[in-house]
């Protein structure tokens, strides 16, 4: 069943920018009512490759891809999510910060049958959807942001949401949970589960698909000037793509340098192609979700240990991604799997690329912020202020713990305990004095009000 993409671009823009928040700023994941279409249906542009050519990798296989839609599964990231299931099997892995500081990962498979065990399944964000809807992919996730919900509703595009289909489409890994993983990091899906989940909507994965890139075998590069890429998405999230000449693939590593291993098959995630799309970004009206300009920009393309600057265009959520080289000619992409990163270059983000001999490459300038964005200077000041507040809270906590240690030591007969506790208290007092001084200097009015409150004096009038 092919899902039609429809609605005017203006309606889409309003829906994406307006969003919806609950009192207190909490983000709703409940779908909004489906709007009445305001325009005639616009058919999805469809390019049908040869039946045996994987439309996401350009590789010829024994699989017949005719009449099969891709499947796009949102994966959880962040603390406690790794190792992921299915990450090494994806034909396309899309990554970028959709909200907060953790990245949004979307694993795309050319066919449902190619999926083994994939997860932990996460909440859909509109960033990932923007790249997979033009492929006529089936979005699979557990929950979705209000912006993702609005996008799907405006386009009358059916997804598969675990909040609706439950255990007919998703399963819980009890063994992982028994090993102290949080419940949200234990839900996964499989090819059969997806088929069962889609049956709730009276659909399956039959339908048209679209070729992802212009695939063509490229000549061997003259130099290995693009061997190691380091992407920083935030203070707590990032990825390293390191070229392995023996396999001709870029091996993905986590932010801490450990290999990105697939919990399903024990293999490391590896890609023939690496794309980094520079995209101007800001913040949506909830003050938390990132807003990206996906009309186009510059970017990086890495393959076979070499890199080049590229240009990309996209447009609204119905428009496919188009890549060109610096001359404006359509970019030839090597057949194989692809890692695609959306990088805004805002405060806290960084990018470095090194040749095989360790020479750092000069990359294009980072994209400009959107009007809704926060300048690097303002973001740095806010981060510094938060660090000062956090340091004071930590010092106060340690001082209280040190006082308790003195009390506990007094109850023992070992004088060494008393000495150690006294030394700890002295160190804690010194750290607290330093943290308090830094806080007083950074926030003199707050410090004065706190002092007056501690002494029982009324706070000054505003």
Image (tube, rainbow, N blue to C red):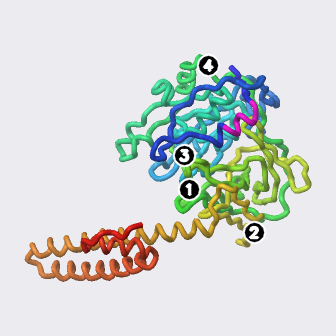
Alpha-carbon distance for marks 4 and 1? 37 Å
- Look at mark 1 in the image and give the residue it sits on: 259
Label 2 crowd bin: few (<14), some (14–19), many (20+), radius 10 Å: some
Label 3, residues with CA under 10 Å away: few <14, some 14-19, many ≥20: many
Marked residue nearer the N-terminal end (4 or 1): 4
Mark 3, mark 4: which one is toward the viewer?
4
Choose the circle earlier in sequence order: 4 or 2.
Answer: 4
Secondary structure beneath dot 1 equals loop
Q: Earlier in the sequence, mark 2 or mark 3?
A: 3
Residue, x 61% and y 34% (percent of image)?
Answer: 150
Q: Position of residue 100 (x, y in %)?
A: 54, 53
Question: What residue lies at 44% left-to-right and 41% top-to-bottom?
Answer: 184
Q: Which residues are magenta?
A: 8-14
- Tag 3 residue: 262
Quarter placement of the N terminus: top right
Give coordinates of residue 144: x percent, y percent: 54, 37
Q: Residue furthest front?
A: 461
Count of numbered labels shown in the rendering = 4
């Amino acid at each position: 069943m092919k899902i039609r993409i429809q609605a005017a671009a203006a309606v889409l823009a309003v829906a994406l920018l307006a969003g919806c928040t609950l009192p207190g700023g909490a983000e709703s994941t409940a779908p909004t009512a489906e709007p009445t279409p305001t325009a005639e249906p616009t058919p999805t542009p469809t390019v049908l490759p040869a039946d045996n050519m994987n439309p996401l990798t350009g590789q010829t296989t024994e699989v017949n891809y005719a009449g099969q839609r891709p499947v796009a599964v949102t994966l959880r990231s962040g603390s406690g999510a790794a190792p992921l299931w299915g990450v090494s099997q994806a034909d396309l892995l899309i990554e970028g910060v959709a909200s907060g500081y953790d990245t949004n990962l979307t694993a795309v498979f050319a066919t449902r049958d190619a999926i083994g065990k994939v997860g932990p399944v996460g909440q859909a964000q509109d960033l990932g959807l923007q790249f997979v809807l033009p492929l006529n992919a089936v979005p699979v996730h557990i929950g979705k942001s209000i912006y993702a919900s609005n996008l799907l509703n405006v386009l009358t595009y059916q997804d598969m949401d675990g909040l609706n289909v439950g255990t007919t489409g998703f399963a819980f890994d009890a063994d992982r949970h028994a090993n102290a993983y949080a419940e949200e990091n234990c839900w996964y899906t499989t090819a059969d589960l997806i088929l069962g989940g889609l049956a709730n909507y009276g659909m399956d994965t039959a339908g048209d698909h679209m070729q992802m890139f212009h695939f063509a075998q490229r000549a061997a590069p003259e130099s290995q000037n693009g061997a190691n890429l380091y992407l920083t998405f935030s203070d707590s999230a990032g990825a390293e793509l390191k070229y392995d000449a023996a396999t001709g693939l870029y091996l993905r590593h986590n932010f801490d340098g450990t290999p990105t291993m697939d919990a399903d098959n024990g293999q490391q995630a590896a890609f023939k192609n690496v794309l980094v799309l520079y995209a101007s970004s800001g913040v949506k009206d909830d003050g938390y979700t990132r807003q990206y300009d996906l009309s186009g920009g510059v970017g990086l393309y890495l393959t076979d240990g070499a890199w080049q600057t590229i240009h990309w265009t996209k447009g609204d959520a119905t428009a496919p991604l188009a890549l060109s080289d610096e001359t404006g000619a359509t970019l030839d992409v090597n057949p194989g799997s692809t890692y695609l990163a959306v990088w805004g270059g805002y405060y806290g983000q960084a990018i470095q690329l090194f040749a095989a001999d360790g020479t750092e490459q000069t990359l294009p300038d980072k994209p400009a912020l959107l009007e809704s964005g926060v300048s690097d200077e303002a973001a740095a000041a806010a981060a510094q202020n938060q660090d000062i507040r956090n340091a004071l809270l930590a010092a106060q906590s340690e001082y209280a713990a040190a006082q308790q240690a003195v009390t506990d030591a007094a109850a023992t007969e070992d004088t060494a305990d008393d000495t150690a506790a006294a030394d700890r208290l002295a160190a804690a007092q010194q750290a607290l004095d330093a943290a308090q001084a830094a806080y007083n200097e950074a926030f003199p009015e707050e410090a004065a009000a706190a002092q007056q409150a501690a002494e029982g004096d009324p706070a000054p009038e505003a």
